[in-house]
Image (tube, rainbow, N blue to C red):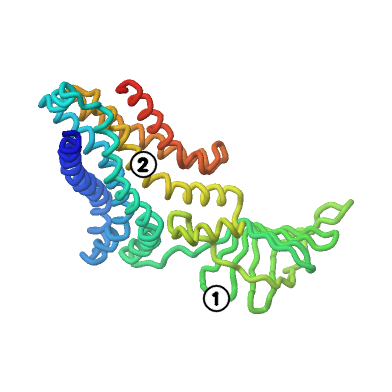
């Protein structure tokens, strides 16, 4: 009898889950359309260009729907069964309540595997295409990649620029906020140029500071030998596949803040898909305590709101170093795992 009942519960949950995925996708894509349709009409976007925008966001949107549909399905299925007294009849027949919860995790392990693959390999490529899709609609070039806080040390001196911009795409880049340390001289300037072909930095309007002397303006442009080559900025962590993100972290490149963001994103690509399994356990335990459909709808709203609050806050805490990146990525799951444990204790 328990096996037959478990199959019936799983069938009910999976029907609601399919409806939930469709509902969340429709709502999310409608939201994207409502915020984009004005730009589509203003810039005369073709149907193909509009589909390019939706296609770029579709994998990331799918992952959200796969996870958020779990509490929707479990709570509404249990709410319906509670309202029709089916779960009461099962309890009267000697079925332990928790025996109906554990099997719910099994199908969502497969959902977690799909979400993990999608988050690590498909969604990053889509997000990388998103900006290009919009600039195609706008009919203009994409913004020039810039490199901030560039620093290079060699036998010719220490070279620093607050920003390196190569707007023309050629061998000459512009420099902003320049500092050159050469011997006992410190040269500062608001700007300059970097000729990678000639391997020189040229700064104008520079000031020279020497020990024991007041800063003096340079008599003219100053030219320094600089043999380094500018490198394009690293793409955001959300646009990098999981293997590339692991390699970037292992190389130790980037600022401490950038490495924290990379570490959080890598951990989140494991934690977020497993949220589907933890949601199934927590929502299943809560669903057994509900008494009607109205309570089930209210519980869905609370689940999604709490998840979004933790999921949106944790990355910011990781970025500034307030929480370790891995802990921040797992924070929503740990919270709902605790909820599942407390509710299971009440149902024991």
From the viewer's perspective, is 152 left or right of 96? right
Q: Position of residue 310 (x, y in %)?
A: 41, 35
Depicted 206 relative to depicted 113: above or below: below
Secondary element under disc 2, as helix, strand or loop, is helix
From the viewer's perspective, is 282 left or right of 151? left
Depicted 239 relative to depicted 228: above or below: above
Q: Residue at x 51, y 68 (%)?
A: 167
Q: Residue furthest bottom?
A: 197
Secondary element under disc 1, as helix, strand or loop, is loop
Within the image, what quadrant is residue 165 found in?
bottom right
From the viewer's perspective, is 256 left or right of 153? left
Depicted 262 relative to depicted 49: above or below: above
Q: Nearer the viewer, residue 337 or 262?
A: 337
Q: Is residue 144 visible?
A: yes
Q: What residue does disc 1 label?
A: 170
Depicted 101 relative to depicted 56: above or below: above
Q: Position of residue 27 (x, y in %)?
A: 22, 45
Q: Residue furthest left?
A: 84
């Amino acid at each position: 009898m328990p096996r037959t009942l478990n199959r019936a519960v799983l069938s009910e949950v999976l029907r609601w889950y399919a409806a939930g995925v469709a509902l969340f996708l429709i709502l999310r894509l409608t939201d994207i359309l409502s915020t984009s349709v004005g730009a589509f009409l203003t810039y005369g976007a073709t149907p193909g260009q509009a589909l390019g925008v939706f296609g770029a966001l579709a994998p990331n949107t799918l992952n959200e729907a796969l996870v958020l549909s779990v509490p929707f399905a479990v709570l509404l299925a249990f709410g319906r069964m509670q309202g029709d007294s089916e779960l009461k009849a099962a309890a009267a027949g000697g079925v332990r309540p928790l025996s109906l919860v554990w099997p719910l995790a099994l199908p969502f392990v497969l959902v977690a595997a799909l979400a993990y693959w999608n988050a690590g390999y498909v969604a990053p490529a889509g997000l990388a295409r998103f900006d290009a899709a919009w600039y195609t609609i706008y009919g203009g070039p994409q913004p020039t990649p810039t490199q901030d806080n560039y620093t290079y040390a060699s036998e010719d001196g220490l070279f620093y620029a607050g920003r390196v911009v190569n707007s023309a795409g050629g061998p000459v880049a512009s420099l902003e906020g320049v500092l050159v340390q050469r011997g006992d001289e410190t040269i500062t300037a608001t700007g300059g140029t970097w000729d990678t072909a000639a391997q020189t930095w040229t700064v104008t309007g520079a000031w020279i500071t020497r020990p024991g002397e007041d800063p003096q303006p340079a008599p003219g442009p100053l030219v320094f030998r600089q043999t380094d080559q500018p490198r394009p900025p690293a793409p955001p962590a959300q646009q990098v596949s999981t293997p590339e993100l692991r390699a970037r972290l292992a190389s130790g490149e980037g600022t401490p803040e950038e490495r924290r963001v990379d570490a959080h994103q890598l951990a989140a690509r494991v934690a977020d898909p497993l949220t589907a399994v933890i949601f199934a356990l927590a929502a299943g335990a809560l669903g057994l305590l509900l008494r009607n459909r109205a309570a089930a709808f209210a519980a869905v709203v609370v689940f999604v709101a709490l998840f979004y609050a933790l999921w949106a806050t944790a990355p910011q805490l990781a970025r500034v170093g307030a929480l370790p990146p891995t802990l921040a990525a797992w924070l929503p799951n740990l919270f709902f795992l605790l909820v599942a444990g407390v509710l299971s204790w009440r149902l024991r």
